Image (cartoon, grey):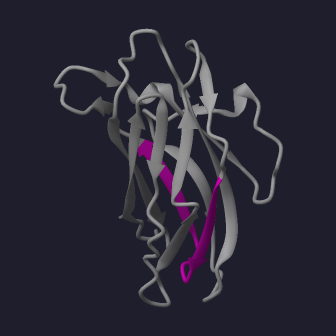
Amino acid sequence: MKEVNKKWCFFSKIAIFAGCLLFFLSPWICWSSPDSLGIFLNPTTVKLMIDGPPKRYVAEKVVKVAVRSGISHWVLQCQATSLKLKGSKEDEIPPERLLIAVTSPGQKKLPSEEDFTRLDEVVVITQGGYTGPSLQPAAQLWFALESRWEDKPGEYEGKVLFTYIANP
């Protein structure tokens, strides 16, 4: 039986600014040795405009995920926390209203509504194996938010935690 390692890789900060949702995604690569995994996200900021009635709003930019791996098998996953209104102890947007769709690298077509998954539970982004020292395109991430009338305007913050599980 192989040993399975679960490692924290990085997290991203999420914020909503009075009608605008911004994701701050770390471009950090955790490649430190030949038997590790490096992840790169581009762009590092995704803007999502909330400029109308309650509905699902999809970010205009897609986040490209590239991976560099010295591991024979790995799984990359993510999960979000609640978005909390700055200056308030009570107002928040729960993570089940923050959504993600994962597509193949290079796909230009917007995913269908059924392709989006809630981020209140762990979502598998991609999985793979050894790539060597070169960075390989792995996936694209499309973010969306389901707004509601009760969402107060202002700046919201939260986190998207990316983790990987390595099975050397």
Visible residue check, residue 78: yes
91 vs 102, nearest the viewer: 91
60 vs 128, nearest the viewer: 60
Q: Is residue 70 magenta?
A: yes
Name the residue at 76% across, 37% down: 111
Q: Position of residue 82 (x, y in %)?
A: 33, 32
Q: Position of residue 123 (x, y in %)?
A: 52, 43
Name of the residue lying farthest toward the top: 149
Q: Horizontal placement of 42 versus 22: left or right? A: right
Visible residue check, residue 72: no
Q: Which residues are magenta?
A: 63-79
Q: Position of residue 168 (x, y in %)?
A: 50, 76
Taking 112 as reference, is 90 above or below it? above
What secondary structure do most residues of the magenta stretch adopt? strand
Name the residue at 51% across, 60% down: 44
129 vs 106, nearest the viewer: 106
Q: Horizontal placement of 84 versus 21: left or right? A: left
Q: Position of residue 119 (x, y in %)?
A: 48, 36
Residue 17, located in which quarter of the rendered image? top left
